[in-house]
Amino acid sequence: MTELVVESIAPERVEVGDGISIPTAWDVIVTGEPGVPGAIRLHGEYDDALRRAVAATVRVDRVGEGDEVTAQVLREARVQWLVAASAFRIVTVAREGGEFQPLSSYLADVRAHSDRTPTEARDQAIVLYRIASTINLAPLKFVSDYLNVSVSTATRMMARARQQGLAADLITRETYNRMQQDEQRRMTGPHRVPGSSPSRSSGPSMGM
């Protein structure tokens, strides 16, 4: 069974926006990874240029005699997962009143609150999108999962937020491409006369 332990966290933190804070650096050790007979050690950092968590160094230490670190073992190390999983443990989010809350606790509250106005849902989507971008997860899927909406709905939320000038720094190529694809499907899909039903027969009706 995989076990991830955060060994150290730098005291300096970066405020990335929307009340989200992440340490500048941290160290983790992971054991029990399938296919890795040893301990994976990762030094993570927040990269200001990329504006997200990254792996600065990764190494694999063998457990003891009878094991060895090979190229195959190194390929088994899930570096991106390690970055996201470790960053998830150390990110905090400020709530009303300025109190910082661990990310896991914050997300539990997000899932528990389902009655949102469209404006509240949009604002929450922006925060979730920024969290996912910061810890190196797919942001639209993250918004979709925690707001319990489809990915296409999450895309429309973020598109509206960007149009309103609220998320101009967050929209990535992923969002842009999805918006294009959705628009293309809408434009090339079948068109029906208003008031018609797709299940209604197109043949002549029988008069009485």
Image (cartoon, rainbow, N blue to C red):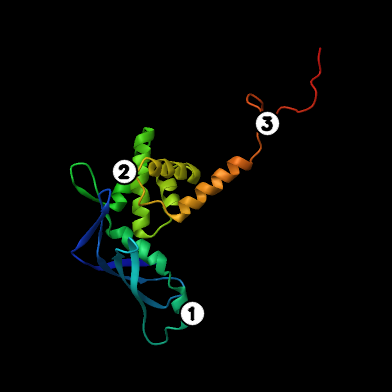
- CA gap, disc 2 and disc 3: 41 Å
Which quadrant of the figure has residue 189?
top right
Q: Which residue is mark 2?
A: 109
Disc sitting over residue 198 in the figure: 3
Residue 169 place in picture, x, y as percent: 35, 52
Q: Amino acid type of disc 3?
A: Pro
Q: Which residue is mark 1?
A: 72
Q: Residue at x 44, y 50 (%)?
A: 140
Which quadrant of the figure has residue 165?
top left
Q: Residue at x 19, y 63 (%)?
A: 12
Q: Quadrant of the C terminus?
A: top right
Instruction: Using the image, determine if residue 101 lies above or below residue 198.
Output: below
Q: Amino acid type of disc 1?
A: Gln
Q: Nearer the viewer, residue 206 or 184?
A: 184
Farthest top residue? 208
Residue 61 place in picture, x, y as percent: 35, 80
Q: Nearer the viewer, residue 165 or 79?
A: 165
- CA gap, disc 1 and disc 3: 54 Å
Give the mark nearer the N terminus: 1 vs 2.
1
Residue 53 place in picture, x, y as percent: 33, 63
